[in-house]
Amino acid sequence: ARKMAGPYNCPDCTRTCRSAGGLTRHRNTVHRPFSPVSDDGPDPHRHRKVSHPKLTAVLCDRNGVNLPPGSLPPADAHLDGHTPGSWAPFESRTEFDFAHFHFVRLQSSADEIDRALDLWTASVLKHGEQAPWRNAQQLYDTIDEIQHGVMPWQVYQITYTGPRPPVAPKWMTETYELCTRDSRLVLQQQLATPEFKDKIDYSPYRQFDGDGKRVWSNLMSGDWAWKQADTIAEDPATIGSMFVPVVAGSDKTTVPVATGHQEYHPVWLASIVQNWCPKCDANPHNLNDPNARRRSHEKTDFLITCFDPGTLW
């Protein structure tokens, strides 16, 4: 048998590698020393970041009282209201896994779920038990009870009540569901999510490259955010607060599972959809079209009156 060399222990940590090449790759990846910055001139890859001087996102408690830097959030701040290990609204992990497997992994149809529940009941009936749900609809009802965070969903029925033409388009005669949550509470939960720590720009900022030229990278690095912060900071009571701009967008999506391919129009954080200009009707492939016309509410209302939403989309 061939004698195995090694082990190859890293002198900088407790890692043990299988070969000399593996040890070299490990050290080059994990323990590579930083190259010193040259003093010969400005480094074009070095950026300087200047945060807004007044809206500085100082840590505070829920009452607005400032806290020392590095303070941790309250230990009981469970965003979903459940203790770790809770499977609510399911009674057990088995129920949760069944729902997740069929609804998320397999995206089973209602008939397939009904069949699986029948088999579950048949397997435990001799013990005087039965499946936790009689049919797929009961399973869907339990899934609908899942609550992430402390903001309950509210559902409203909406119908068109305005004047109708002799032959009304479909959208004027149907009833629609509006599912909504308190947007302010949603934002509060997002900001309280530990996974987002250090991944948020807490203050508007201006960024400059090594040559001192301005660099724009996202919303908080732009002039609009900085000017908004200036306006807010005119009130001395806001000094040290955090500017939280909200960018909302909507797009149609079809949900095939359990809804019969029902169309929804969720609202989420988004940018301009499919490269269309938000101000004019220029084609995405020719945004400099001199014949493009400005968008207007009047034009939108006219098109909605003349065409079915499916045609407009």
Image: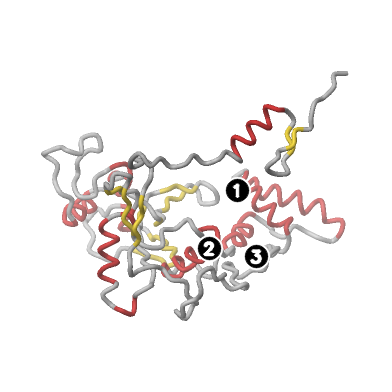
Q: Secondary structure at mark 3?
A: loop
Residue at mark 2: 193
Q: Is residue 282 above or below residue 113?
A: above
Label 1 with label 3: CB-CB less than 8 Å: no
Q: Nearer the viewer, residue 6 or 157?
A: 6
Question: Please, what is the three-letter code of the amino acid marked with disc 3?
Answer: Pro
Q: Which disc number belongs to residue 104?
A: 1
Residue at mark 3: 89
Q: Is residue 308 left or right of residue 65?
A: left
**Residue 127 falls in image quadrant:** bottom right
Give the residue at the far left of this rendering: 291
Compute the Cα span from label 2 to label 1: 24 Å
Crowding at label 2, few (<14), some or many (≥20) Cα neighbours within 10 Å? Answer: few
Q: Earlier in the sequence, mark 3 or mark 2?
A: 3
Compute the Cα span from label 3 to label 2: 22 Å
Q: Is residue 167 left or right of residue 220?
A: left
Question: Please, what is the three-letter code of the amino acid marked with disc 1?
Answer: Val
